[in-house]
Amino acid sequence: MSVLVELERVTCSYGGEPVLVNVDLSVRAGDFIGAVGPSGSGKTTLLKAIAGVIKPIAGRVKHERGVTVGYVPQVETVNWYFPVTVREAVLMARRGGRFVPWPSKQDVIEADQILERLGLGGLGERHIRELSGGQQQRVFIGRALLRRASLLLLDEPTSGIDVKTRHEIMHVLHDLHHDGIAIVLSTHDLNGIAAHLPQLVCLNREVIASGAPHQVVTPVVLEKLYGAPLEVLSHSGMPVVVESYDEMADVSSSAVIPLREGHHGHPG
């Protein structure tokens, strides 16, 4: 598989201490990668570096010629009161959109086809703030599809949504991956999401380990990653992370295991 993006000894900072240090990572066509780690470990910065949104202070990020990257931020970071409809939000991602103020009939048709594919058919005229959290995530995925992204980056795509919606989002992502789109997502959900992905990158400012879940979801790696001992069990051949109760106070359960599912304030 061809390399879409290559990170070589990448270090990133926002003016203070580096948040990424000497990160090496190759993203290839056909990859489906999950970046896992505690809060503040640099997962969002990693995605932004891959997207070219931020520039490293050391090292380099090399994109293959012709690669189109779609970036889906955390829904909590988006101003959902910006006055646009669902269809308009998707159409804002079209190529040349900043120079061509009005979408063509074909643009609208393509946007509606994408919305239909993502289970948002018939919602094009709705204001984006009227959607549920999972639907809002799919709007941003739709923007990436309209740009014909060959690489899709998602920052905590299942944060703050219920189990049913999480499954729907992951079903959409697996379908897109099957269609040939490479995907890199960040997640704190080791059991619900990370254990089911083909490849993981364990990140805490630097890459602690990378590989298939059964290779990297181990007590040794997790203690390096989270700074506290965690136990790993096996269920149907899948690793399952549980807290070490002797060290329970040292690790936030929400950063490791999603004990409760909830919404982020949107209906549905």
Image (spheres, rainbow, N blue to C red):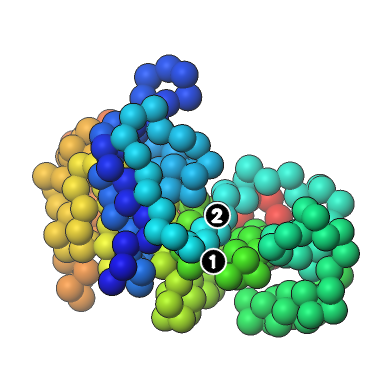
The front one of 15 and 243 is 15
Mark 2, Cα crowd under 10 Å, few <14 / some 14-19 / many 20+, is many
Rendering coords of residue 88 (x, y %)? 81, 63
User: Relative to 256, does residue 143 appear above or below in the rendering?
Assistant: below
Instruction: Give the amino acid at mark 2.
Output: Tyr
Quick check: marks 2 and 1 in contact, CB under 8 Å? no
Residue at 71 percent of width and 64 percent of height: 94
User: Is 258 or 143 nearer to us in this picture?
Assistant: 143
Task: Mark yes or no: residue 165 visible.
Answer: no
What kind of element bears circle 2? strand
Q: Position of residue 15 (x, y in %)?
A: 47, 19
The residue closer to the viewer here, 255 or 31, is: 31
Q: Amino acid at mark 1?
A: Ala
On the image, which quarter does residue 221 sit in? top left
Q: Is residue 111 above or below residue 45?
A: below
Tell me how far mark 2 sits from mark 1, CA to CA.
Answer: 9 Å
Q: Nearer the viewer, mark 2 or mark 1?
A: 1
Instruction: Residue 79 in the image: state x and y as whole percent.
Output: 74, 44
> Label 1: which residue?
149
Q: Residue at x 86, y 59 (%)?
A: 101
Using residue 92 as the reference point, say whether residue 208 is left or right of it.
left
Residue 238: percent from the left, percent from the top? Answer: 22, 69
Say which residue label 2 marks: 71
The quadrant of the rendering that contains the C terminus is bottom right
Q: Seen in the image, is 141 located left or right of residue 249? A: right
